[in-house]
Structures are given as structure tokens and as C-alpha cells.
Image (cartoon, rainbow, N blue to C red):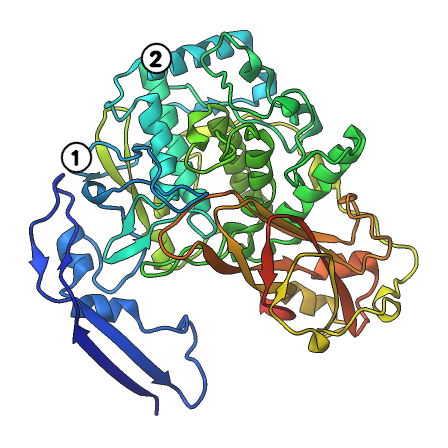
Amino acid sequence: MPSLSLSWTVAATSSFPSFSGKPSTAKSSTRFHVSCNVRNDGQNAPNSRGKFDRRNMLLGLGGIYGSTLTSNQPALADPIQPPDLSKCGPPSDTSTGESLDVNCCPPVKQAVDYQLPRPTVMRFRPAAHLATKEYIAKYNRAIQLMKSLEDDDPRSFMQQANIHCAYCNGAYDQVGFQDLDIQVHNCWLFFPFHRWYLYFYERILGSLIGDPTFGLPFWNWDSPKGMTIPPMFLDTNSSIFDTKRNQNHLTSIADLGYNGTDDGKSPLQTVSNNLNIMYGEMVRNVKLIEDFMGQPYRAGDAVNPGAGASERGSHTAIHLYVGDPRERRLENLGNFYSAGRDPLFYCHHANVDRMWKIWRDLRGSKPKDFNDKDWLNASFVFYDENARLVRVKVSDTLSNERMGYVYQEVDIPWLKSRPQARVQKSKVATTSGAPSIADVKFPVALDKVLKVLVPRPKKSRKQRDKETEEELLVIQGIEVDTAKFVKFDIFVNDEDDKIDELDKSEYAGTFAQVPHSHKGPKKIKTSIRLGLTELLEDLDVEGDDSILVTLVPRAGDATIGGIKITYVST
């Protein structure tokens, strides 16, 4: 039988959050410290997440979820809850960990549950490089009107920019978990949060110009025809111009494998790399939903459980590619706290949101969404076009059409960019001379190229096994400083070591993060998973006992805790 031992002590006072618009005066005279030892005959219970069930602890503290937040919250769930705006604090400086001299906190009002209206007309989101002069004039007018609103108006341009600053840089505590901040990146909240963010931003702009069909443009950086910054954003006299952009990248092809410096690749190589990067993060590496959406993140969890392939790939690359190296923190787009100050941010994220739609469309009959209630019931607060503070849920984001907007249909060239299979079977793993994983002492500082042989528990799998079980390369215990841009690339059985050519079968994927801050230690640990099933087919090495894994540091410092191959049911 499992055994459980608990101890708790009276420690300090604790206050509870309220949506009343003022700090709650109700306080508890005690704060319990719970220490637990859980045993189940030496085995962890499935889905235990390796820790004491926080929901039971919350109930022991008086039922925070049911009583002090909203009356309709289930008592036995632990989805991320909307922050208490009255307890919003300053964001942290990603360089020093000290508070930034920036106020990202919104006005405080009583929140109401948002009822998603049934659309009577569809908002149309055009590809930015194909936008008409009439649309560009309308868009500029809308942004100009948003910028002319009073600073304390929650619909104003700076207040809208501050949403990203507050939610993403440690300004909000998780409800019920003081000193644990809310972070909507590097987890399964990434796509739904930003979908809601753009939804209200777009509706505010449409309301200001009296056009219910107005939709944000999307930067079509996944297609060669749209890979440069859209020209409309380069007009110095327009309301969507921003001075804080990398001046060397204003008219060049955006590098979706950007490493923080320009490396002299030809435009043709960059385009070819970009298409393979997109194929990898949209098809090859994301057969499992959490590898696209991000890893689960629940109330009481620390930040950064793990980003999906799209977030840590093209999404991060564009942020850093546009961010201004003349600025200490790579403002504006190169840092989470300032990203929303550049109108190009919303155009960039419209394409990120489009990637979610495309990925869901590509899934066919396969699961498109988590069925976990802690994801579906996760919620946020935003101000709508009527300046009401509204509470929204992830469960309402599952269809962009249901939310009332559609994207212009354009060609998707990366769908045809699966790398060509090798003619001869590679023997790289057996001739490389690299050490076996068992001979490497982890953790390892990734201060140089790391090559290691990783054994495959299963080989020569039949097609039906591949269809029901994905072979995954897991890079675990990745320790990084969140204040820094960190990036490394992963290759499998790469015999040529042409590490700038990402348009080949051997390129497996990447880890990258946008600089940001959070409460607690600056360094965090996370992990990533990369799909191997299709890649090994391309390399014609499915019968090999081991593969050669190469990690190439690109920017910042990282420590690797381990590397392994695992198999997960699809």
C-alpha cells in the first residue's frame, strides 16, 4: 500500500486575491508549510508529476479556488487562473534581476466572464505583403487612433503593449502561490493566450475605425514571398513604424534559424533553411500534441515546463531577428517586456496563430486539442473594445472561425520541403569515434560542440508500430539563464558537420528562448523532445543500434542534464 507522511508548521501571514479592484483585507493568520514523502512500492503513480497534489493543499488552506476568486471555479481543479490585478508588481530587469523602471500594470476593475459572441461577419486577416493600399491606410488609421487614447485607457497602445510585459515578465503572481509568477510562454498556454491577446487587440482597432470586418495583417515569414519585414512597416511616416529594430535586417530575408549574429549565409541558403525549419516544427517533430503546443503547466508549477517546436523555433527567431542590438535588452521585439511596443509584434504573432490553425488542419482525424481540464479551464483577463475587464478561457480558443476571423489563403511551400532521403545507408554512428552516452558524465556544460552515441531501445520497427508510437529524442535537464538569449541546434548522424546547412535530413531541431525574467532563481531547467521516426527513415538508419547526436551551441550558455531516446503512444 502507498504510504504518505505529512507535516506542517505555522509560518507567516497570507492574503488572498480578489477581483474587487482593491487588495483584499481578508487575511489568514497562518500559512502552512507542507513537506511530503510519498511511496508507492518504489514507483511513482501515473500523472503524479512527482509532487504533492496541490489541489489538496489548497483545499486545506480554505478552498482558494472556490471561494476567493470566482464562484464558478471547480474546487478540485488546478488550471492557471487569471491574476489579481490589484497585486500586480513591477517586472524584473532581465539583465540584473532588479525591478525595471516600468509600470506594466493595467487599471483595476471588476472582471466579468466573457461570452464569446456568435460572429455575424468574419474579420479578414490578410498576408501583410499582399495588403492593398486601402487596407494599409485603414490599419495605420486604427493604430493612430489607438495611440491617441489616454495612457490610462486600457485600450490605448501602451496599455495593450503592457499586457505582454505583465503576463510574461513576472509582474503577476499565480493565484494562491505567492512568489510563483504566471508565465504564458514555454508551456501549453502559449498559443491560446496569444490568440486571445490578438483577438481583443484586433477588436479594439476595428471598433476605433468602426469596421467590424477589420483583421490584423500576418507577416507571412514561412513563405519566400513574405520572408522580409512587410514593407508597410518601413514607412517612417506611418503609425506602425518603430525605430527600435535591427537596422541590418529591415530588408533582408528573415532567418528562422537566427543565432543572434549574421553569419554570411546566402539568401538562397537562408530560404532553403527556412523551409526545412518550418517542415520540421510543423510536421516532423510534432506528431504528438504536447510537442507542438508545449508541455502542461498548472497552478503551483514553476515556470518553463517546455516549449513546443514552433514557439522555440520560428517564433523565437523572429523576435531576436527584429530586436535592436543597439538596445541593452534588445528592445523592442527582442525582449518579452517590450515586444508589444512594436506594431510588428502583432503581425508576427498573427502568423504564429496561423501556424496553430494550419497544424490543426494537418492533423486530420488525430487529436487536435488537449482534453485535460486544467488546459481547457485555464483562464486570463483582458480588456475588450468597450474597456470592460473580461475573463476568458482556453476552451473558447479552439476554432478561429468560431472566434470570428479567418486568414487569407496563401501557398504553403514548406509542406513540400521534406528533405531527400540518402541513397546509401549512413554508417556515421559506428565510425564517428564519439563516446557512448554511458561514458559521458552529465550534466555537461554546452560550451563547445557535443557529440555522443545514443542507443535505440527499439530498431527496425514495422510500419504499424511507427503509426501508433513515436520515437523521440529527449534532451533533458536543460539549464539556462532566462535573462539571456540561449540557443543550440541538434543534428543526428551528421557526417559533414556543415552546421549552417539546416536544409538537410540530419537537422533534427533547436532549443531557443527569448530573454525574459521571472520570480525566483534566474536559472531554470527544462527539456525538449524531437521526433525521430521520419528523420530516421530519411537517413535510412532504422536498423541501427545507436544514433550519433550532435549538439551545436549557437548563443548563450546552457547545461545539458541528459540525452535519451524514448517511445510515446500517438
* Residue 90 position in % (x across, y down): 30, 40
Q: Secondary structure at mark 2?
A: helix
Q: Which image quarter is the N terminus in?
A: bottom left
Q: Is residue 545 left or right of residue 426?
A: left
The amino acid type of the residue labelled 2 equals Leu
Q: In this rendering, is residue 65 above or below 266? A: below
| Cβ atoms under marks 1 and 2 closer than 8 Å | no
Q: Is residue 119 left or right of residue 355?
A: left
Q: In this rendering, is residue 144 above or below 351? A: above
Considering every residue shown, the one lying at the far right of the view is: 424
Q: Is 554 in front, or is 276? A: 554
Q: In this rendering, is residue 459 above or below 205? A: below
Q: Is 370 in front, or is 479? A: 479
Q: CA distance from mark 1 to mark 2?
A: 23 Å
* Disc ID at residue 145: 2
Q: Quadrant of residue 117?
A: top left
Q: Quadrant of residue 490?
A: bottom right
* Residue 258 position in % (x across, y down): 66, 38
Q: Is 98 in front, or is 216? A: 98
The residue at which mark 1 appears reads as 109
Q: Secondary structure at mark 1?
A: loop
Q: Could you classify mark 2 by the number of other residues whose Cα lies within 10 Å: few (under 14), some (14-19), or many (20 or more)?
A: some
* Disc ID at residue 367: none
Q: Could you classify mark 1 by the number of other residues whose Cα lies within 10 Å: few (under 14), some (14-19), or many (20 or more)?
A: some
The amino acid type of the residue labelled 1 equals Lys
Q: Which image quarter is the C terminus in?
A: bottom right
Q: Is residue 152 left or right of residue 540?
A: left
Q: How many marks?
A: 2
